[in-house]
Image (cartoon, rainbow, N blue to C red):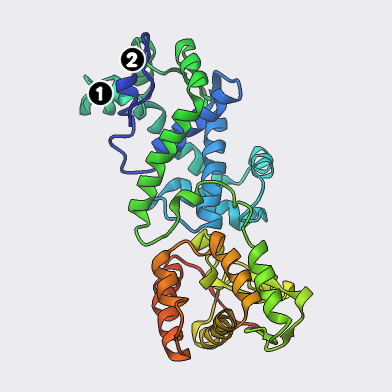
Amino acid sequence: MNLPSSSQLNTRTLARIFDNKSESYKLFWFKAILKNVGEGRAEMSYGDLIDQMIIDAWYMVSEFHLNLGPADTLEKIVLRLAEISGLTPSEKPEKIKDYLAECNDAEILRMKKTLTLNVPYRLQAPFMPEANTAFWKQSPDATVDYINRKTGMIYTIYRARGLESTIRIHDEWVDYISENYGILLGWTDFNLINYLQGRNPTVPGIASKLYPPQVRKLNNVIKYWRGISEIHPIIDIYDGEVLGSREITIDHFVPWSYVASDELWNLIPTSRSINSSKSNNLPRWDAYFEKLCRAEYDAYKLTQENKNIKGLFERCARENLNSEEVRQRLYRPGLDRTEFSGQLSEIMMPVYESARNMGFGEWEFR
């Protein structure tokens, strides 16, 4: 991807800052710089940047269970924060920021300092092609002195104690980032998506998992199942009770925080209380998959037989059935119950198993 050119700056070198990334830190560090400049700051402390990195990683790790890398310190911080803070996986960024500002947990502080050992210096390595192995083994003060004397760098560094050290973005880079903020953020996210996909090769929808969970498209799905409930009783697959039309909420059988989509084959009606109880867990396959098949097949049959339900289904399909292959396999006319269940199992089982391998826990209604 070509970045916007500049007559003053070496943007070709900027485009190479993510070329050598065995870990996630450069991506999150630069993204934190972009956000600070976007909010009008040219000077920022290590502590502020690390806190922004934690906030940006929070949803990926806590909500979506993404792996940032082997022994990744940023991931460890998020997991520790989730353990001690009481913050929810979908917590607002402001609340995470406020908690971090007051957090004195020794383990988190130690790991935050670890993150500052290399990335503030290594991010700008492409601007220093002359730097060799010996250069990176010298003292931090010597490295900083060299960076601060070299022209063309993105920022200078003012060392203090630990997280109190600061960086100062050069004015010409502030202008460039401000003018091209959206492009640079999109470019960074593009590189982050590619990195995360490599670390999480079986996980779908990586691009949807960089930011807090979005509003889900379930209105037509609710109308579809409510329409069905008016002509055919809907039995909740989790507690066996009949669901009234106004009781219906929609559950993602494989949690939304894993699939990051609202595909019809993964959606099933349940009550609000059960939906809340299940949360981001996987229903135990042996206990519930057959019941899921029964409910979805009954709905499928009504779609074939009832004109009104067919119309509701088609409205759903426009938003909630985005794979033509799945539509042909699962919703084509003429399937019997065994064929339908087999197709649904083949579609869902790999997704279910992948979610379980990523650490999503199993759940059963009690």
Q: Position of residue 342 (x, y in %)?
A: 41, 84
Q: Is residue 248 visible?
A: yes
- Assign a secondary structure to mark 1: helix
- Lateral position of residue 71 relative to residue 314, left or right: left
Decide which of 168, 345 is in the foreground and name it. Answer: 345
With respect to residue 328, does 88 lie above or below?
above
Q: Residue at the spot x=63%, y=70% of the render?
A: 312
Q: Earlier in the sequence, mark 2 or mark 1?
A: 1
With respect to residue 164, does 142 lie above or below?
above
Q: Position of residue 283 (x, y in %)?
A: 55, 78
Q: Residue furthest front?
A: 307
Check disc 1 and give the amino acid type.
Phe
Check disc 2 and give the amino acid type.
Tyr
Q: Residue at the spot x=44%, y=18% of the render?
A: 155
Work out which quarter of the rendered image holds the C terminus and state it: bottom right
Q: Position of residue 214 (x, y in %)?
A: 60, 51
Cα distance, mark 2 to mark 1?
Answer: 10 Å
Decide which of 237, 124 is in the foreground and name it. Answer: 237
Mark identifier at residue 146: 2
According to the picture, the residue beneath numbered tag 1 turns out to be 135
Name the image quarter holding residue 164. top right
- Assign a secondary structure to mark 2: helix
Work out which quarter of the rendered image holds the N terminus and state it: top left
Q: Residue at the spot x=51%, y=72% of the render?
A: 265
Q: Is residue 353 visible?
A: no
